[in-house]
Image (cartoon, grey):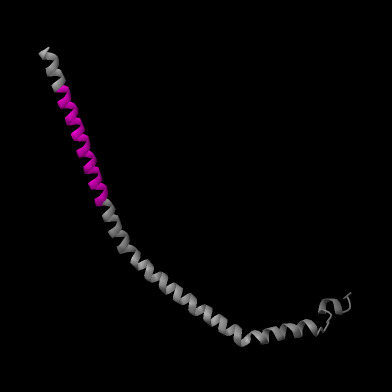
Amino acid sequence: MSEREAQKIVQKDRSKRVKDARSEAQKEIEDYRKEKEEEFQKFEKEHTSGNKKAEEDADKDAEEQMNAIKGAGEKKGQDVVNDLLRVVTEVQPEVPDRVAGPPKA
């Protein structure tokens, strides 16, 4: 019976070592994951700051261009509408040159 007890003790010890090794490996994995996540956050922060600046510059340029277009629309808008109405309402029919002339023989 002492041999069986010895086997049980050895088996318990093995299973305890396996559990300890598994939990230690899990801890190492978590530490590694945390380290890589911090590296990624640092990398992302360094490389997206330039994009933010470019995005802000592009937004500013687009806003300036929109304001210029709106200003031109306010200045010339009524003139354009008047010209369109004049062209549509004052019809001056003309016969095209290729239709107006007599056929050449």
Rendering quarter of residue 38: bottom left
Q: For this view, does 52 lie left or right of residue 42?
A: right
Residue 66: x and y, percent?
53, 78
Residue at image position (26%, 55%) is 39
Residue at image position (18%, 34%) is 20
Rendering quarter of residue 43: bottom left
Q: For this view, does 62 lie left or right of residue 41?
A: right
Residue at image position (24%, 40%) is 26
Is residue 3 shown above or below 77?
Answer: above
Q: Nearer the viewer, residue 68 or 14?
A: 14
Residue at image position (14%, 15%) is 4
Q: Which residues are magenta?
A: 10-35
Question: Which quarter of the rendering shows the C terminus?
Answer: bottom right
Residue 51: x and y, percent?
38, 66
Farthest top residue in view: 1
Is residue 31 shown above or below 73?
Answer: above
Is residue 22 shown above or below 37?
Answer: above
